[in-house]
Amino acid sequence: MLFLSFFIFGSFLGSFSNVCIHRLPKNESIVFNRSYCPGCKKVINWYDNIPIISFILLKAKCRNCDFIIRLEYFIVEISTAIIFSFIYYIYSFSITSLLLMVLSVFFIIIFFIDLKHYIIPNELTFPLMTIGFIKSFYPNLNQNLFPNYINSLIGGVFGYLIIWLIIYLYKKIRNKEGMGLGDAKLLSAIGFWFGWFSIPIVIFFSSTIALLSVIPSLINKTRNLSEQIPFGPFLIIGCVIFILFGNVIKLFLFNY
Ligand SMILES: [Zn+2]
């Protein structure tokens, strides 16, 4: 029963994430405007705005004007619901679950905004850094997953500096920008959340996966090597790998 509650709760947070994904880059208010159809600008009725279900019932179309609702809305809602259920399944009703749910909502919003607009808004990274640091002072924190406040602080600084350095060197050598400071702030937030050890692991997995994902388009010549790719989504994938397998990796590397 609780499992289903978390699925439904997740779908509503997914729906809220959709609002943020579409309004934050345009600096529109998240809270005060009702959802409207981008086609006919008509305000959407509450019964047509139920996460997951409305998309299926309306067959991905606006009731008023046949505007096609993008599949992305549905994907965001259903994946948030699945992630929330999964977190509840692993960590049940706990502070750890709550923290990971907050993190997932931030990650989903950043993932899609960066993918579409090549930006990571400070309105997202700054709160994420703050929560990541402040949570370290909670006395009964899950020690397997989260660092103490010193480790958290080192992680935050380390994460920012390493991408700042990459940007600096890249500018010196090739005289242009490869990554943005948004990426530096995102990796800093990850460091605040998971400590210094997460930084090299996240960089390793995110750059490997990013490289593997551009190889096909390099071979087909639909893209060239100097073209920009959004790196935020890859940092997030790298961080998820760390959350899931960080302890196994630690064990493998240090045998402790
Ligand atoms: Zn419409």
Image: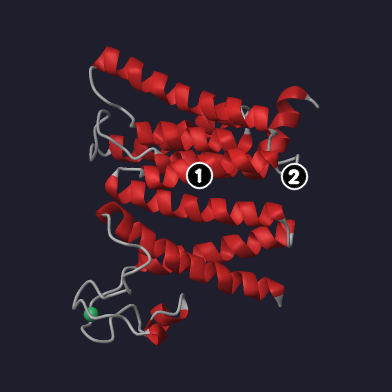
Residue 244, picture quadrant: top right
Residue 211, picture quadrant: top left
Percent x, y for residue 82?
A: 57, 64
Amino acid carrying mark 2 in the image: Asn
Closer to the camera in the image, 220 or 229: 229
| 167 vs 152: above or below | above
Q: Residues within 10 Å of mark 2 (few under 14, many from 20)?
A: some
Cα separation, mark 1 vs mark 2, equals 18 Å
- For label 2, the SS is loop
- Please state, as top left, top right, bottom left or bottom right, where the N terminus lies in the image: bottom right
Amino acid carrying mark 1 in the image: Leu
Taking the spot 56% from the left edge, 33% from the top edge, the residue there is 191
For disc 2, the marked residue is 142
Residue found at the very far left of the displayed protein: 40
Taking the spot 35% from the left edge, 46% from the top edge, the residue there is 114
Q: Residues within 10 Å of mark 1 (few under 14, many from 20)?
A: many
- Please state, as top left, top right, bottom left or bottom right, where the C terminus lies in the image: top right
